[in-house]
Amino acid sequence: MNRCLIACALLLSGCGTEPAGIVVPADLLIPAPGWTGPVPRTAGELMDAVAAEKRGRELANARTETVANLLATTILQYEDLVSAEQRQAQ
């Protein structure tokens, strides 16, 4: 769902004469690492792997939320701009 929002925003940014101005910092587009070690063989290794996966998932979710907020802000600004242009046209 979140990828769909990003794709829609990118497609919409190509519409019109001016770019939409969506600026997504590069660090938000880097994949979040999870467990990168070998297959866990002991309970301790399994706990380490689970903790690493949890940290990676939380980081990925935080990045996705930040991108969603950037998109929502941009969409609201665009809607305000369109409303202002419509008021001027009347």
Image: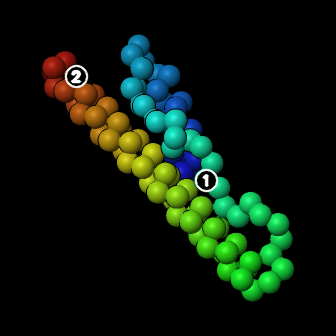
- Return the x and y of residue 13 as percentages of the image width and height: 46, 26
- Return the x and y of residue 16 as percentages of the image width and height: 42, 18
The alpha-carbon separation of the residues under discs 2 and 1 comes to 41 Å
- Picture quarter containing residue 85? top left
Q: Is residue 70 above or below residue 47?
A: above
How packed is label 1: few (under 14 Cα within 10 Å), some, or many (20 or more)? Answer: some
Q: Quadrant of the N terminus?
A: bottom right
Circle 2: element type = helix
Q: Nearer the viewer, mark 2 or mark 1?
A: 1
Seen as rendered, the residue at the extreme bottom is 43
- Picture quarter containing residue 46? bottom right
Which residue shows up at 54% across the image and 51% down it?
2
Residue holding disc 1: 32
Comparing 49 with 13, the one in front is 49
Q: Amino acid at mark 1?
A: Ala
Residue holding disc 2: 85
